[in-house]
Image: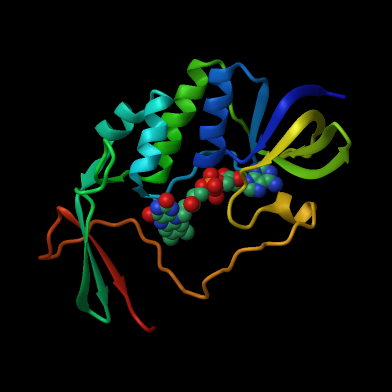
């Protein structure tokens, strides 16, 4: 066996990084891997909910997140171009009664640097290719981008590998939730428009 840890975290998105930071604070041994060679570069999880900031506060990263983010207290929902509903976040019962807007890659950057302060580095460019399960342990087989392989023995393998989880497929676990058959367009751009910049605007259409 190449290495042994208590927990192998598959995926260094916000979920995996937050778990890693939590385990680091409790002194649990772990490794965190991601098949991507570089951190993500787009906004994706840009709207952070108050509860997440509460969790970040316990992990000592909330302050930096709030310093780098924009916070928004109101939102607007439009259907086919018509303003249909208004959202008010300022009355939420939480120390952080607003939605925090920060690009996912920036959140990941803050979490990853916090992990580094605890002496942990994300092992990038490594893909979980298979798992062998035994009653009290697992053996995870990892493949690097250059083709090299290694095996890690872990008490737990945590699938933090996103919505199309490859770990879930490897274990033949069913997806018990429901997916929405909706098309979304993702673009990070600067908009020059007359509507308020102090509120979130979400547009739905039938197309
Ligand atoms: C257009 C769009 C808009 C969104 N807007 C919001 C929003 O406003 N607010 C919000 O909260 N969420 C939003 N989301 C959802 C958000 O992106 C996800 O909730 C978030 O990315 C989940 O984080 P995660 O860490 O669980 O997974 P991910 O960010 O998907 O990270 C999973 C990681 O696992 C790695 N990985 C996968 N398989 C393997 C493997 N076999 N071996 C090694 N590594 C692997 C991937 O490379 C990836 O880095 C949006 C998503 C999209 C697409």
Query: Image quadrant of residue 28?
Result: top right
Image quadrant containing the C terminus: bottom left
Count of labels in the image = 0
In the figure, is residue 14 to the left or right of 204?
Answer: right
**Front-most of residues 112 and 84:** 84
Query: Image quadrant of residue 19?
Result: top right
State the image coordinates of residue 94 (x, y, percent, origin top left). Answer: 28, 40
State the image coordinates of residue 162 (x, y, percent, origin top left). Answer: 59, 51
In the figure, is residue 145 to the left or right of 141?
Answer: left
Q: Is residue 44 visible?
A: no
Extreme residue in the front direction: 93
State the image coordinates of residue 1 (x, y, percent, origin top left). Answer: 87, 24
59 shown above or below 66 = above
Q: Is residue 95 visible?
A: yes
> Which residue is located at x 70 percent, y 32 percent?
8
> Which residue is located at x 78 percent, y 29 percent?
154
Extreme residue in the left direction: 194
């Amino acid at each position: 066996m190449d290495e042994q840890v208590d927990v192998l975290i598959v995926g260094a998105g916000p979920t995996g990084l937050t778990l890693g930071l939590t385990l680091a604070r409790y002194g649990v041994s772990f490794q965190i891997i991601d098949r991507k060679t570089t951190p993500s570069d787009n906004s994706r999880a840009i709207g952070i909910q108050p509860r997440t900031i509460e969790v970040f506060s316990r992990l000592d990263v909330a302050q930096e997140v709030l310093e780098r983010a924009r916070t928004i207290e109101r939102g607007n929902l439009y259907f086919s171009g018509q303003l249909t509903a208004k959202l008010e976040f300022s009355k939420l019962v939480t120390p952080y009664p607003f939605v925090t807007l920060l690009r996912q890659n920036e959140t990941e950057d803050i979490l990853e640097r916090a992990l580094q302060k605890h002496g942990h580095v994300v092992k990038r460019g490594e893909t979980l290719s298979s798992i062998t399960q035994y009653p009290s342990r697992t053996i995870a087989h990892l493949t690097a981008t250059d083709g090299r392989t290694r095996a890690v023995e872990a008490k737990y393998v945590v699938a933090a590998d996103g919505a199309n989880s490859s770990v879930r497929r490897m274990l033949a676990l069913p997806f018990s939730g429901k997916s929405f058959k909706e098309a979304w367009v993702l673009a990070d751009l600067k908009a020059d428009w007359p509507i308020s910049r102090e509120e979130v605007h979400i547009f739905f259409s039938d197309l």
